[in-house]
Image: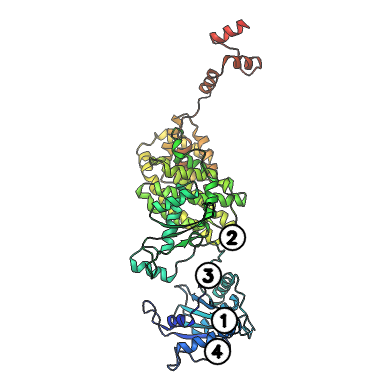
């Protein structure tokens, strides 16, 4: 059950006209009052043809008029409106039950506390099977205003109790970190204009898409404008940015003026101060495109950053920072991924946006590696190769699972559910990303004898999961990966142990697939040759330093002619 308190209004008669009218789509049927304040003595315009909406409005507004005539400062924000809607799968509720529900909600809100004979005047109107509208005028009979601070939280708690008492679908308790739901007017407007999304949702997607691309507030505003978003900024006397509001092109009011939504109203984490804090915590020492000579691609670097996520969640402020940055990395990956994965990754990023924010304040500087990875990915000119992409998406699956578990441990119900939805989309993307690699590996299996030896390595390295791994349809491909790694000088037994240690396999649907992506990532380079490495280090040390190390017993005696001549001179 959802009770959505609307912004305060000033026209009681106008709201009554809507409640008793046909509705925007002729959806209002048989409007009538199911409950009201104890002194309600007016006939119901929905049941008495002689009753009028104007008379009912004057009756509800009477305490407001008395207060305004007594005090010089008039009350104009006195109309309290709260639609209360049951879930589509809930049972039919009678008028009596809806009346009882309305009474509990106005009590919880502070409109009409239990036993208070001087409370505000209110009525509950039903014009559909699945919801009611509560209308109240927020001046009490004694002329005082009701205490409505945090009424939304109290009403939400009351709804959770109502759901239990009436056997209705039980929703999760809110924590005031969710994005604002589009209003009915915004949804109807989107439908009328042929838009797939209402304006607030459209704007939220584009603002989140901009964050990985920019490093400061001015770049952020410029990027939004370049991407087609109407932006209105607020600056201080020195010219510095203080705030912003965003608008969708074509979204205008009745006067033809552009409608703007403040960032903080679009979503609590999209206010300018919060975005600036995140950007400042990830400001690079150099531009991402300057790191072209880095031996590892941005996709490999992102996987490396994700590998450390589980160990960075011990501290709550660090955990929240990493989960927020994980959402930015998801957004960046969705923008640069191949077309066949983009839809699932975009859906995962959109679902995970709710998991990015909680009441815990983030220590954003702790998530520098993840944010740097996101920034590098959106600035890279080339896409990933198949194995690199498969490894990264598999790492994203595990990271989202880790985030979900952390939220569950903290009783963050909405965030845990959002992370769970993201995992489902990521798993589908991971399966698609790995499919070409699996086909290539399966086409060139190692010899039967080699596979038997590698199977013994699996049983020795991961005994608790060995039978599941060997029964996995992807086992032949894993055997090929292990054989390839062995050819590069790695030890299959050691690679299996390291891969299993990086992520537990109990929750893995297909453990062989998980190990393939992990081993391809960690074993992509030849194993170091210790003798060759030692020789290389010796060749880069100057003679004077080598002589000192020889005297200290750190190196064997010099054997090169130059070193021998140097020693003779001494």
The answer to whether the residue labelled 3 contacts the one labelled 4, judged by CB atoms less than 8 Å apart, is no
Mark 1 neighbour class, 10 Å CA radius: few under 14, some 14 to 19, many 20 or more: many
**Residue at left 56%, top 66%?**
173
Does the image show residue 1? no
Q: How far apart are marks 2 and 3 (CA)?
A: 16 Å
Q: How far apart are marks 2 and 4 (CA)?
A: 43 Å
Residue depth check, mark 2 versus mark 4: number of the one nearer the observer: 4
Under circle 4, the secondary element is loop
Which residue bears the numbered disc 2?
A: 411
In the figure, residue 155 lies in which quadrant? bottom right
* Mark 2 vs 3, N-terminal side: 3
Under circle 3, the secondary element is loop
* Mark 1 vs 3, N-terminal side: 1
Under circle 2, the secondary element is loop
Q: How far apart are marks 1 and 3 (CA)?
A: 20 Å
Is 478 above or below relative to 254? above
Which residue bears the numbered disc 3?
A: 170
Most foreground residue, 345 or 478: 345
What's the mark number on residue 40?
A: 4
* Mark 2 vs 1, N-terminal side: 1
Residue depth check, mark 3 versus mark 4: number of the one nearer the observer: 4
Residue 389 x, y percent position in the rendering: 42, 43
Which coloring applies here? rainbow
């Amino acid at each position: 059950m959802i009770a959505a308190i609307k912004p305060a209004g000033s026209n009681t008669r106008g709201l009554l006209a809507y409640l008793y009218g046909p509705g925007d789509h002729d959806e209002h049927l048989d409007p009538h009052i199911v409950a009201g304040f104890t002194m309600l003595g007016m006939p119901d315009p929905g049941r008495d043809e002689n009753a009028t909406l104007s008379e009912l409005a004057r009756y509800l507004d009477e305490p407001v008029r008395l207060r305004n005539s007594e005090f010089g400062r008039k009350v104009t924000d006195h109309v309290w409106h709260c639609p209360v809607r049951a879930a589509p799968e809930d049972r039919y509720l009678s008028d009596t039950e809806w009346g009882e529900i309305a009474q509990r909600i106005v009590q919880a809100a502070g409109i009409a506390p239990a036993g208070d004979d001087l409370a505000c005047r209110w009525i509950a109107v039903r014009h559909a099977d699945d919801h009611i509208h509560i209308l109240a005028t927020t001046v009490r009979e004694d002329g005082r205003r009701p205490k409505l601070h945090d009424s939304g939280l109290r009403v939400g708690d009351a709804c959770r109790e109502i759901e239990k008492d009436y056997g209705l679908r039980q929703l999760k308790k809110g924590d005031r970190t969710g994005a604002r739901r589009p209003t009915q007017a915004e949804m109807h407007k989107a439908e009328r204009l042929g838009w797939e999304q209402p304006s607030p949702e459209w704007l939220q997607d584009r603002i989140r898409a901009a964050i990985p691309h920019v490093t400061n507030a001015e770049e952020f505003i410029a990027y939004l404008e370049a991407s087609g978003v109407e932006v209105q900024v607020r600056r201080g006397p020195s010219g510095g940015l203080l705030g912003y509001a965003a608008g969708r092109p074509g979204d205008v009011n009745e006067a033809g003026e552009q409608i703007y939504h403040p960032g903080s109203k679009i979503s609590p984490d999209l206010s300018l101060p919060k975005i600036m804090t995140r950007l400042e915590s990830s400001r690079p020492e150099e531009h991402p495109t300057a790191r072209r000579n880095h031996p590892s691609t941005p996709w490999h670097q992102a996987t490396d950053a994700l590998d450390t996520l589980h160990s960075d969640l011990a501290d709550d402020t660090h955990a929240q920072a990493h989960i927020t940055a994980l959402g930015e990395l998801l957004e960046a990956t969705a923008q640069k991924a191949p077309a066949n994965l983009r839809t699932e990754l975009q859906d995962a990023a959109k679902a995970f946006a709710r998991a990015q924010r909680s009441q815990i304040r983030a220590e954003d500087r702790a998530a520098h590696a993840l944010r740097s990875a996101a920034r590098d990915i959106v600035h890279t000119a080339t896409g990933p190769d198949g194995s690199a992409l498969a490894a990264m998406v598999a790492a994203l699956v595990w990271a989202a699972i880790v985030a979900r578990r952390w939220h569950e441990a903290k009783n963050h119900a909405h965030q845990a559910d959002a992370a769970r939805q993201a995992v489902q989309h990521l798993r589908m993307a991971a399966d698609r990303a790995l499919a070409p690699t699996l086909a290539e590996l399966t086409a060139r299996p190692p010899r039967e004898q080699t596979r038997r030896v590698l199977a013994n390595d699996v049983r020795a390295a991961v005994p608790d999961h060995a039978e599941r791994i060997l029964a996995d349809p992807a086992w032949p491909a894993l055997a090929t990966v292990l054989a390839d790694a062995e050819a590069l000088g790695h030890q299959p037994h050691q690679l299996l142990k390291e891969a299993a240690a990086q992520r537990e396999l109990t929750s893995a649907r297909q453990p062989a697939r998980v190990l393939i992506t992990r081993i391809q990532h960690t074993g992509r380079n030849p194993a170091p040759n210790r003798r060759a490495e030692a020789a290389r280090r010796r060749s880069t040390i100057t003679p004077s330093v080598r002589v000192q190390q020889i005297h200290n017993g750190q190196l064997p005696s010099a054997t090169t002619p130059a070193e021998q001549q140097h020693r003779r001179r001494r």
